[in-house]
Amino acid sequence: MSSYDGKKLGALHRHLHAHMPSDPALRVKALESLAIEKGLVAQETIDTWVEMYSEKVGPKRGAQVVARSWTDPAFRERLLDDAGQAIKEFGFEGHATEHLRAVENTPDTHNLVVCTLCSCYPFAVLGMSPIWYRSAAYRARAVKDPRKVLEEFDVALNDDIKIHVWDSTAELRYLVIPERPDGTEGWEEDRLASLVTRNAMIGTQRDLKVT
């Protein structure tokens, strides 16, 4: 008869569950499998939507817009004047971009975006919003103590740098234009776009890394 070792079984249980998807992910996968089995949707259709949101509708679109603003002063002016209209030049338009405003970081100014009421987000240019952006903690603290919140994202700002907190709504959403990194003179747009991150376009990252 085998002996019972509670500690070993507990460790095995934790090890197995540490490598399993989260409960929401399991539910999504179960619903996906059921929909495919019932003939409600094809696997190819799901794959296409996933690819669109991860590779096209995701932050890569916003990165293209930022890169263009760095290389084309006229476009930058149009973007700052009417972002929703300017991004139509890329074909990136939709409900989430009809009332989009671009705000730019400068050496003495940093911009941070939050949605205190819900989680309004320009998904047409940034993809799906991150979980932390939708959390009650971020939504409340970003307004009350933005400098502290930024420190938790490893963004330490000197006291002489002013922070603007922009509160998104269903009628007005924001896109942060980060500063162009030094050492990128002469770079083409695609290469510049590869430096731009989603967090930088929300404002929870300031200094972009040159790779």
Image: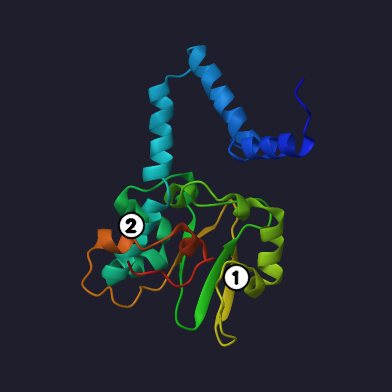
Q: Residue at x 77, y 34 (%)?
A: 5
Near-viewer residue (34 or 180): 34
Q: Which mark is residue 150?
A: 1
Q: Give the CA separation, mark 1 to mark 2.
A: 25 Å
Few, some or many residues within 10 Å of mark 1 (<14, 14–19, 20+) = some
Residue 139 visible at all: yes
Q: Is residue 56 left or right of residue 120?
A: left
Viewer-side label of 1, 2:
1
Few, some or many residues within 10 Å of mark 2 (<14, 14–19, 20+) = many
Instruction: Give SS at disc 2.
Output: helix
Seen from this angle, which residue lies furthest top? Answer: 38
Near-viewer residue (93 or 44): 44
Q: Quadrant of residue 7?
A: top right
Residue 175 visible at all: no
Pointer 2: what residue?
64
Q: Residue at x 35, y 74 (%)?
A: 181
Q: Is residue 200 above or below residue 88?
A: below
Q: Where the N terminus falls, by quadrant? A: top right
Q: Residue at x 75, y 23 (%)?
A: 2
Instruction: Give SS at disc 1.
Output: helix
Near-viewer residue (7 or 26): 7
